[in-house]
Amino acid sequence: MTGKEILYKMKEKVGLGSSADSGKGKSKMSKNITHGYHLVKGKSTHPMEDYVVAQFRQVEDNELGLFAIFDGHLSHEIPDYLRTHLFETILNEPNFWTEPEAAMRRAYSITDNTILEKAVDLGKGGSTAVTAILINCQKLVVANLGDSRAIICKNGVAKQLSIDHEPSMEKDEIEGRGGFVSNFPGDVPRVDGQLAVARAFGDKSLKKHLSSEPDVEVEMIDNDTEFIILASDGLWKVMSNQEAADAIKNIKDARSAAKHLTEEALARNSSDDISVIVVRFG
């Protein structure tokens, strides 16, 4: 086995992915729950700025499914930092088991402050994030900043579990902080004419006008639950929630489903980095 193959196997085992990468895993608590992920670099000249986490972890008598996509802008250091630090910060919150939603909000705030303090090392850019924690195969807690997105499919119907933080939707809040939202012809709305999302980690130069408060949603897993999809905006720019759900409804292997979605996004001329995680239930 070559060094590259060994590294690939190690990354697949711990569920950390970047660049052109792919991986899969399964729950020990429920053999019917599996996950797979696939990443494809976009057409831009800068390095890959998407990173994922996809793993099941035993914590004493509990099992946690930890899933996340971090989509950097002007930075690959910050999403890489989030990949290795955000979940540890969440799980170290003393109230995680009793109030996971509050723990995630506090951990997001702590992590953002740390990134700003480390701006000299991590650079001037930032990152969006969508994170999902599956607690004992029963409770799903989703948090997000920016325009990466999580959906759940039950009985063939796709439901969005996160909120796309578009500058046009938070114009009043941005202006209330002293910023502005540009709306130039041929371009998307941007905070201070620069950033196309209203919330993100990092972005020290824009932080006075930019929120790092996540939206948090809780969903219970039941017998109707088929799968969840987490993906960066490289997918959602060219596919609706229902189109993505319909595209993989008959693909039982989670990694194959994730890869199929990236291929479909490329076929629809998505030029951005594309990262997809699929978690299948039964």
Image (spheres, helix red, strand yellow):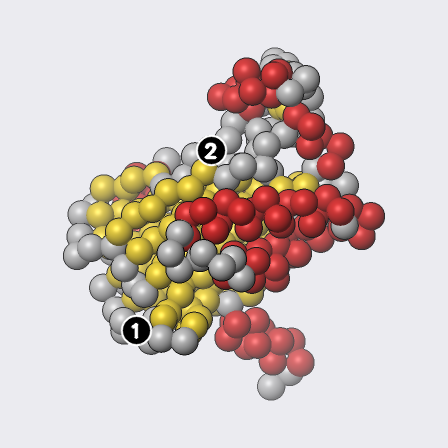
Task: Give the residue at x 49% y 54%.
Answer: 68
Image coords of residue 264 (percent x, y): 42, 46
Task: Give the residue at x 75% y 32%.
Answer: 205
For the residue pair 164 and 175, the one nearer the viewer reads as: 175
Task: Give the residue at x 67% y 80%.
Answer: 3
* Element carrying mark 1: loop
Task: Say which mark, if any, is on residue 29.
Answer: 1
For the residue pair 11 and 250, the one nearer the viewer reads as: 11
Residue 238 visible, this orientation: no
Image coords of residue 139 (percent x, y): 31, 56
Q: Is residue 49 above or below residue 65?
A: above
First in sequence: mark 2 vs mark 1: 1
Q: Amino acid at mark 1?
A: Met
Give the residue number, with chain letter if any, for mark 2. 164
Task: Give the residue at x 62% y 42%.
Answer: 201
- Mark 2–mark 1 CB contact (< 8 Å): no
